[in-house]
Image (cartoon, rainbow, N blue to C red):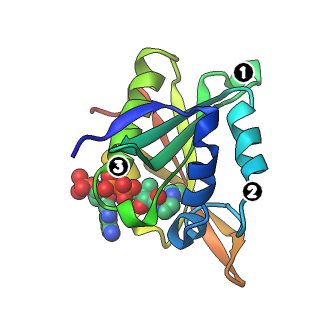
């Protein structure tokens, strides 16, 4: 199986909307039900965003955004958000996206710290992040509302120079 990583294009908007309408992709992120095409159009146009997608045989199967901080004192920091189609989870797509994003961060964008939040019950995502050198920095109680209940999240980060890959 060949996973191709490339930058997102405007033509990807419907596939991104469809990906985040899937139950697990929605439950693992901050996406709301019934995502619109307009929302994803805006996201791709947002300044400071590096938006990557993963494709297999022409199907968009995953997405990862690096949102680089605009404050000059935080310009060494970016935040990651990502999702893989429910029917493509566990097949290496998330790993391929993360490897490409960290290569960009380390070797091209000179980003020193990459941070993210992940729900405490999202074990596959935490395993992926640990595999790539992210460590836990704290817990946010009642971080978000999901399917009628509050859910806690972990703050995780990867600081370049403190990990070996
Ligand atoms: C979390 C997510 C991005 C992972 O992507 P993926 O393509 O499924 O991940 P991979 O197949 O590359 O697996 C990466 C690692 O995760 C771990 N993993 C994968 N599936 C797992 C599972 N069901 N349970 C526990 N660990 C799992 C493994 O350690 C794996 O590494 P390995 O195969 O080298 O052992 C994806 O499942 C997803 O989009 N989930 C829904 C949305 C979401 O949660 N986004 C993240 C928000 S913080």
Q: Earlier in the sequence, mark 3 or mark 1?
A: 1
Question: x, y percentage for residue 69?
Answer: 69, 29
Looking at the image, residue 10 lies above or below residue 82: above
Residue 159, image x, y percentages:
46, 33
**Residue at 45% across, 23% down:** 104
Name the residue nearer the viewer: 88 or 164: 88
Q: Nearer the viewer, residue 151 or 62?
A: 62
Name the disc covering residue 73, or none: 1
Q: Earlier in the sequence, mark 2 or mark 3?
A: 2
| Helix, strand or loop under label 2 | loop
Disc 2 and disc 3: Cα gap in Å?
Answer: 24 Å
Distance Cα–Cα, label 1 vs label 2: 34 Å
Q: Note whether ligand 1 is within 8 Å of mark 3.
A: yes
Rate crowding at label 3 as few (under 14), some (14 to 19) or many (20 or more) other CA atoms within 10 Å. many
Q: Which residue is mark 3?
A: 93
Tag shown at residue 136: none
- Direction from residue 47 to residue 2 in the image, left or right: left
Left or right side of 37 for 15: left
Q: Which residue is mark 2?
A: 36
Does the image show residue 133?
no
In the picture, measured across the screen, residue 84 lies left or right of residue 14, that is: left
Mark 1 CB lies closer than 8 A to ligand 1: no
- The image position of residue 42, as x and y in percent, is 77, 40
Nearer to us in this view, 53 or 18? 18
| Mark 1 nearby-residue class (10 Å; few <14, some 14–19, many ≥20) | few
Report how far apart the C-alphas of labels 3 and 1 lie in the structure: 33 Å
Whether residues under marks 3 and 1 lie with C-beta atoms below 8 angstroms apart, the answer is no
């Amino acid at each position: 199986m060949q996973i191709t990583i490339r930058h997102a294009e405007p033509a990807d908007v419907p596939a991104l909307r469809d990906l985040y309408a899937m139950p697990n992709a929605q439950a693992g992120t901050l996406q709301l039900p019934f995502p619109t095409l307009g929302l994803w159009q805006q996201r791709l146009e947002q300044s400071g965003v590096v938006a990557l997608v993963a494709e297999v045989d022409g199907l968009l199967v995953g997405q990862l955004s690096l949102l680089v901080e605009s404050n000059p004192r935080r310009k060494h920091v970016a935040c990651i958000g990502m999702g893989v189609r429910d029917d493509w989870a566990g097949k290496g797509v998330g790993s391929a996206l993360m490897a490409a994003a960290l290569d960009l961060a380390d070797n091209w964008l000179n980003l020193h710290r990459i941070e993210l939040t992940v729900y405490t019950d999202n074990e596959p995502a935490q395993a992926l992040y640990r595999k790539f050198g992210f460590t836990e920095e704290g817990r946010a109680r009642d971080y978000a509302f999901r399917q009628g209940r509050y859910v806690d999240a972990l703050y995780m980060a990867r600081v370049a120079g403190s990990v070996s890959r």
